[in-house]
Image: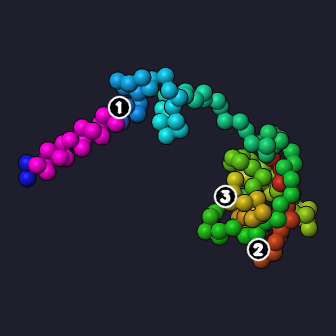
């Protein structure tokens, strides 16, 4: 039993010496080039914090005026109020919608919609009724930002 512990100890000591020799401690290898496996990582560089830049859509979004057209379908009937969830805005804001078929308009709350822009917009049942449209139709709507 003593012999096996001594063997393990000798192996550990020799391993430690080999590691020290590889990194150049106690040898003339200090001037030798460092291989890729021996590369020491530099300390973490400090990251300069910069304010988030607005997206292209936010840069081009006017404070008021037309934001563009969208195709809207009925949103959740359980959500009350006059609203339009649309990819044309990045934050909730007051707005106005004009239904292309009838020209009728309504003041609504514009809300950003989750998901891809190609998913279109969702409109509240109250807003559909305010512009004289059918809840089963896909609605072509012009969206305006207010104020």
**Residue 135: which disc?**
2
Q: Secondary structure at mark 1?
A: helix
As for residue 21 lying within the magenta part, the answer is: no
Q: Position of residue 92 (x, y in %)?
A: 68, 48
| Distance CA(mark 1)–CA(mark 2) | 77 Å
CA neighbours of label 3 inside 10 A, class few (<14), some (14 to 19), many (20+): few
Q: Secondary structure at mark 3?
A: loop
| Observer-nearest of 125 and 64 | 64
* Identity of the residue drawn at 76% across and 59% down: 117
Indicate the quadrant where residue 108 lies: bottom right
Of circles 3 and 2, the one toward us is 3
CA neighbours of label 2 inside 10 A, class few (<14), some (14 to 19), many (20+): some
Q: Position of residue 94 (x, y in %)?
A: 74, 47
**Residue 20: which disc?**
1
CA neighbours of label 1 inside 10 A, class few (<14), some (14 to 19), many (20+): few
Q: Position of residue 101 (x, y in %)?
A: 91, 68
Outermost bottom residue: 136
As for residue 7 lying within the magenta part, the answer is: yes
* Identity of the residue drawn at 8% across and 48% down: 2
The reply to whether residue 84 is in sight is no
Mark 3 vs 1, N-terminal side = 1
Of circles 1 and 2, the one toward us is 1
Q: Position of residue 64 (x, y in %)?
A: 83, 42
- Up the image or down, 144 lies above or below 120; here it is above
Q: Would residue 101 appear left or right of 124 to someone viewing this image? A: right
* Mark 1 and mark 2 residues within 8 Å of each other at the beta carbon: no
| Distance CA(mark 3)–CA(mark 2) | 21 Å
* Identity of the residue drawn at 72% across and 60% down: 116
Specify start and end residues of the magenta stretch as a single range. 3-18
The reply to whether residue 97 is in sight is yes
Q: Dot 3 corresponds to which residue?
A: 114
């Amino acid at each position: 039993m003593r012999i096996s512990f001594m063997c393990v100890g000798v192996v550990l000591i020799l391993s430690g010496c080999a590691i020290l020799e590889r990194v150049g401690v106690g040898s003339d290898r200090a001037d030798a080039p460092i291989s890729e496996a021996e590369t020491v990582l530099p300390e973490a560089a400090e990251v300069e914090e910069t304010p988030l830049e607005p997206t292209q859509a936010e840069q081009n979004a006017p404070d008021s005026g037309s934001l563009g057209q969208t195709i809207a379908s009925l949103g959740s009937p359980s959500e009350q109020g006059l609203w339009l969830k649309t990819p044309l805005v990045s934050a909730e804001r007051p707005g106005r919608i004009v239904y292309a078929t009838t020209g009728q308009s309504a003041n609504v709350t514009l809300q950003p919609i989750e998901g891809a822009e190609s998913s279109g917009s969702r409109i509240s049942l109250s807003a559909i009724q305010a512009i004289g449209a059918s809840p089963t139709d896909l609605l072509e709507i012009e969206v305006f930002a207010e104020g």
